[in-house]
Image (spheres, grey):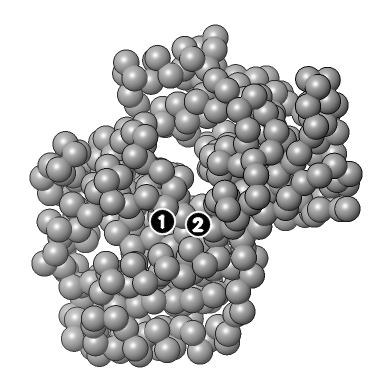
Amino acid sequence: MNVKIPYGKDFVDLEVNIPHEVLSPNEPEVGDESGIISHALSHPIGREPFDEFVKNTNSLLVIVNDATRPTPTARVLQEMKDILADHPDVKFIVATGAHRAPTEDEFRFIFGEIYDEMKEQIFVHDARKDEDMEYLGVSSNGTEMYINKMVRQAGNILVIGSVEPHYFAGYTGGRKAFLPGVAGYKTIEMNHKHALSNAAQSLALEGNPVAEDMTDAMEVLKDLNIFSVQTVLTADHGLYAMTAGDLLESFDAAVDKANEVFCTKLSKKGNIVLSAAPYPMDIDLYQSQKALENGRLALEEGGIIILVSKCRDGVGDDTFLNLLGSSATCNEVMEKTSECYKLGFHKAARMAQIGTWAKMWAVSDLDSDVLKSAKLESQEGIQEAFDKAIDLIKEQGKEPYAIILPQGSLTIPLIE
């Protein structure tokens, strides 16, 4: 059979002639998009309707995701357009975390039709500007919490996020807009170091130190007047569900909906796993690593995992690449990570961890030397890599069995 594998904004046909399973996010029935949004805004969880919330604020800060997330921010803002336009003091801040600022095209992707009229009111969080941060205290896990001063200055917050499983934070969305979204660089670095913990896993919230930091930050910020909007998308970025109202309650409700979409069952693990990072999550290697992380859940020890990602903007934050490239083996990467942590090292450690028990290949626009530094063996094409993996498994005297994740960044394989 042929399986369509995303590569950038295009698709490549993969011919598969061995026993296999194709795992993709589930395809739940989707209702009217405008109706989903308006119903959530008028029937929030634990809060007054959105129009009343806005009416009772004299200043409003809207926190939105950057372009590394497929959050349908523009669609939600379009529904809110008239209410926000009438507000006397509304500002927007792009929650970049430690990412770069958006490009002009990315601003338009985030804000849609309102961008031109609101652009003077849009700010971009810069985690490296210490002077823009306010100290909140220390989390229960020892993280020093700094957050952008604009948050407390506004007091009234509208946060628009999207909820999906995250390979070490448990889930994106909700409280993640604050930490790491608009947190200081040191805070993000300390928080992400917890990703090295075995408790920092996809779907895990309780006992996950990364997620606990986020919860601790919101406990300090409990005096804020927050209205939360959390979206849950299908794999093709259609709007499946939206919850609104109280930050924590709307997040919990969105988690239940996200599990319905992104958790898929497989009968057994494969000795070949092909996992693709779909657009826009293929922006760089740093982000594409999530497809590797999800793919590992479906891979047998000693198998081969093939990452497929265009990596349109290159490597991304190259801290993790420098660590991988400066180490002779994956085991050496693990040792260096535990000795001296820097932001980005968690990516290197988790990639290297796979490399200690499996082969890692990649089909990408990145130069083969760059991939080699990342401990990924460069392959010429998707079909070529897949066929080569089959031959290698056969040479080992094994029967090839493949797990294919066309939406690897968004698919959580679970053994039945």
Q: Is residue 62 visible?
A: no
Sequence-first disc among 2 and 1: 2
Query: Quick check: 17 left or right of 42?
Result: right
What residue is shown at x 73% (from left), y 50% (from top)? Answer: 21
Tell me which corner region of the image, top left, top right, bottom left or bottom right, holds residue 48. bottom left
Left or right: 56 with respect to 207?
left
| Residue at x 24%, y 48% (from the top left corner) | 212
In the rendered image, which residue does mark 1 sit on? Answer: 172
Picture disc at residue 94: none
In the image: residue 16, left or right of residue 170: right
Residue lying at 81% horizontally and 22% vertically, measured from the top left: 397
Residue 114 in the image: state x and y as whole percent. Answer: 48, 76
In the rendered view, tell whether residue 261 sits above or below residue 240.
above
- Disc 1 element: loop
- Cα–Cα span, label 2 and label 1: 10 Å
Mark 2 element type: loop
- Characterize the local packing of mark 1: few (<14), some (14-19) or many (20 or more) Cα atoms within 10 angstroms: many
Q: How many marks?
A: 2
Q: Give the camera-side residue of 394 and 163.
A: 394
Q: Measured from the top left, where is residue 25 in percent x and y?
A: 61, 61
> Residue 223: where, in percent of width, then height?
11, 67
Quarter of the image holding residue 98? top left
Label ID, residue 69: 2
Q: Amino acid at mark 2?
A: Arg
Residue 276: x and y in percent read: 67, 46
Q: Residue at x 34, y 39 (%)?
A: 199
- Please identify the quarter of the rendering in which residue 145 is found: top left
Can the viewer see residue 402?
yes
Residue nearest the viewer, comparing 193 with 90: 193
Q: Are marks 2 and 1 in contact (CB under 8 Å)?
A: yes
Q: Nearer the viewer, mark 2 or mark 1?
A: 1
